Image (cartoon, coloured by chain):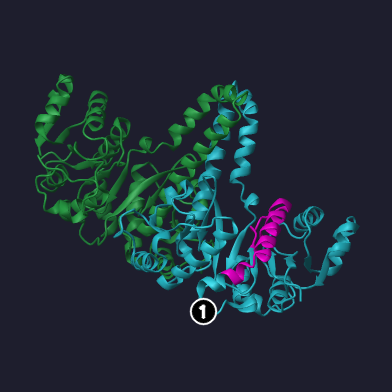
Chain colours: A green, B cyan
Amino acid sequence: MNTQAIAVDVMGGDRAPDEVIKGIVETVRTHPIDLILVGRADLIKRELSRHRDVLKRVTIHHAPDLVEMDEKPLEVLKKKESSLYVCAKLVAEGKAGGFVSAGNTGALLAAATFVVGRIPGLERPALATPLPAENGVVILIDAGANAEVKARNMLDFARMGIAYAKILGISKPRVGILNIGEEEEKGNSLVKESHELLKKELGEIFVGNVQARDIPFRMADVVVADGFSGNVVLKSYEGAIKFFVETLKKEMRKKPFPSYIGALMMKPVFNALSRRFDYREHGGAFMLGVKGVVVKAHGSSDALAIYNALKVARKGVQMHLPQMIEEMIS
Amino acid sequence: MNTQAIAVDVMGGDRAPDEVIKGIVETVRTHPIDLILVGRADLIKRELSRHRDVLKRVTIHHAPDLVEMDEKPLEVLKKKESSLYVCAKLVAEGKAGGFVSAGNTGALLAAATFVVGRIPGLERPALATPLPAENGVVILIDAGANAEVKARNMLDFARMGIAYAKILGISKPRVGILNIGEEEEKGNSLVKESHELLKKELGEIFVGNVQARDIPFRMADVVVADGFSGNVVLKSYEGAIKFFVETLKKEMRKKPFPSYIGALMMKPVFNALSRRFDYREHGGAFMLGVKGVVVKAHGSSDALAIYNALKVARKGVQMHLPQMIEEMIS
């Protein structure tokens, strides 16, 4: 039993295994961490042959099979020799405290729910994503695990988000609910019902409705949403910023001088900005509500993203995030 | 009867009446347009006393009452002497072809639906907003009028969006549905059912699911959503860009030199960008599905926003947008 160890799905993600391995190498060299590399053993050994120091400090767990990015979520449960399934299994058996994967989100949710297993009393695990915001991040939960939910699930999401915020060092997190207006009577029936329930159950830490435009300005530390609208927020932010940056570049090409020199001079500013808004810096999202730490890294994760996802998972394991959630739910 | 005239709610919006009047002055001086100014006649006359040329070319319609920004939507129906109600009434009576208001959105929806009246066969009017996108805009419908809808309403939204796209000069608009994945089986039950219906009814112009992050990259010309998620998209875009720009400014203050000089040199680029992303440039959203042109300008509209909203309304009236929609629906 080693519940401090973290299993890594070496085969998951668009840029696996190369970038995943690179991220692992970087992590092992800079952090005291106990990693179990799950995937094709021959391939992992070959990739690590140039990094003997790392090879000595990790455990390799052979898993010959693979879950493809476009496979149906529940297929993973039949693929018991896939790297994703094996990662979940290691956590279920107490051989690891958590796992990280950049693979298929639906499959990861299925593996987390049915292999790692739900926390007793909790009906729906949810994806919690940190969004860049003033002086830090805001936790958005559910960011896409459940397309359809009930008010009582939203209350669980709130409680899980609070536990997550605490491991980020926010001692008294304020919770809001995503809505399309500030007034209490706004929104669809799910949001209205959830609003009532959160207000009753959470007391003064519940700050009420938060509009999507106010999220980055920290109206709340935790924003609760059903997985459909939560995912819409996440992807709208991603699209808006990508489009803004691309339009900026296009406008610069139209007006090459002296804008071009200006841009060069602004380089440190642009670098700071891209660090701030780069999903890779935030290290992926927690799949909360299961009996182990599960971190979903972005599908196109590179070494940096994997490195940060491993750091996030390590923190979750060290701080006993699943146990914290279990206590909040019960 | 003058169905080319446009009524303006002079009293609606956070910056009314001053900025509304300024926008009117600018419009009348640069466009052949027939405006009916609705609000307190004494106040309008006083504001226009310095602009005698404009005063001579507009009609003033006295409306002593006012709908407040935070009033319940249906209250407007009792306030028959409010500027908003009177605007809607002028359209209903055929004295104007359309109206523009920067006031209370819910009240505007109520006035449009119950005073101007729905197009026969259409159950739910919807708000259609142009979002900045590659080489133009993408039309998002419903951007917030209906928090809860059915699949058949989504089909109406699609058809209304097509008519709108046509007045923007897109002869064969491609229609997509907002979803949280690209695969057909993704989403909540409303989206799945709507997907089926749109596919069946619209044929090849229906391009399927569009994720929020792909909207600005023109995966479709018209993106259909329920009013809750549509509003979430709209406000997420607004928030993301506002936060990005503020973070850029903050980073610049941290690194004043030579970034500051760089920013000055990039001024033309930043100006072009802010024109591109400024809501005021897009002139407000159409409330589609009613028997007249109804344009909702942003609540904090200034003169420029009103000017553009009037231009949009004028185009809708000239191109007989309500009739186009009536033909598409029947």
Residue picked out by circle 1: B121
**Residue B280 can be seen in this image:** yes
Circle 1 crowding by C-alpha within 10 Å: few under 14, some 14–19, many from 20: few
Screen quadrant of the N terminus of chain B: bottom right
Magenta stretch prevailing secondary structure: helix
**Residue A172 can be seen in this image:** no
Residue B129 lies, in percent from the top left, at 56, 58
Residue A53 lies, in percent from the top left, at 17, 20
Residue B292 placement: quadrant = bottom right
- Residue B323 belongs to the span the image colors magenta: yes
Residue at the spot 72% in from the left edge and 56% down from the top edge: B15
Residue A323 lies, in percent from the top left, at 23, 50
The residues colored magenta run B296-324
Whether A259 is drawn above or below B101: the answer is above
Whether A127 is drawn above or below B159: the answer is above
Question: Helix, strand or loop at disc 1?
Answer: loop
Residue type for callout 1:
Gly
Task: Please report, as a chain letter, where disc 1 is located.
Answer: B
Say left or right for A312 vs B125.
left
